Amino acid sequence: MIWLIGVYLVLVIALPLALSALVSYRTLPRGVTCPLCRGETFAVCARWLRWASRMVRRGTLVRRWCPACRWEGVVRQQVLPGAPRVRPPRREPRPER
Ligand SMILES: [Zn+2]
């Protein structure tokens, strides 16, 4: 009986979550240019993306911001074989006042 509950949980919860994450990842824009205006974008610090990037083998998830059209979103950047993984910049601690 317990295996039936396990199968049910996998089919109802784990499998839809995994498929949703896979489809969402595949639809993310690639590269460092803005998907709307093709302008240059800048990396923005996002801690949860650092955690999520560990699960992606061939890429890094980076939050980016476009100053021209104010687009902000997550892109995936490919990591070339042998190249060091590019991480988003770490947030520096604020100076004491
Ligand atoms: Zn833009």
Image: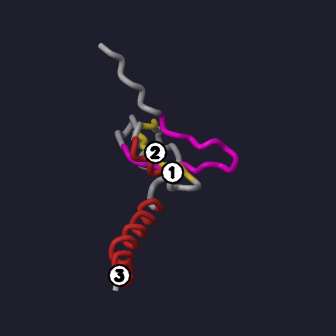
Q: Is residue 5 left or right of residue 27?
A: left
Q: Amino acid at mark 3?
A: Ile
Residue 67: x percent and y percent? 39, 35
The residue type indicated by label 2 comes to: Arg
Query: Which residue is identified by label 2?
Result: 50
Q: Amino acid at mark 1?
A: Arg
At label 2, counting other C-alpha atoms closer than 10 Å, the crowd grade (few under 14, some 14-19, many 20 or more) is some
* Residue 80, magenta (yes or no): yes
In the image, the segment drawn in magenta is: 72-89
Q: Earlier in the sequence, mark 1 or mark 3?
A: 3
The 10 Å Cα crowd at callout 1, few under 14, some 14 to 19, many 20 or more, is few
Instruction: Report if the CB atoms under discs 1 and 2 are less than 8 Å apart.
Output: yes
Position of residue 66 measured from the top left corner of the image (x, y, whole percent): 41, 39
Where ligand 1 lies, by quadrant? Answer: top left
Locate the N terminus by quadrant: bottom left
The residue at the far top in this view is 97
Q: Earlier in the sequence, mark 3 or mark 2?
A: 3
Q: Residue furthest right?
A: 82
Label 1 element class: loop
Residue 31 horizontal side relative to residue 45, left or right: right
Helix, strand, or loop for circle 2?
Answer: helix
Q: Which residue is mark 1?
A: 54
Q: Which residue is mark 3?
A: 2
Residue 62: horizontal and vertical position, in percent?
46, 45
Q: Nearer the viewer, residue 9 or 53?
A: 9
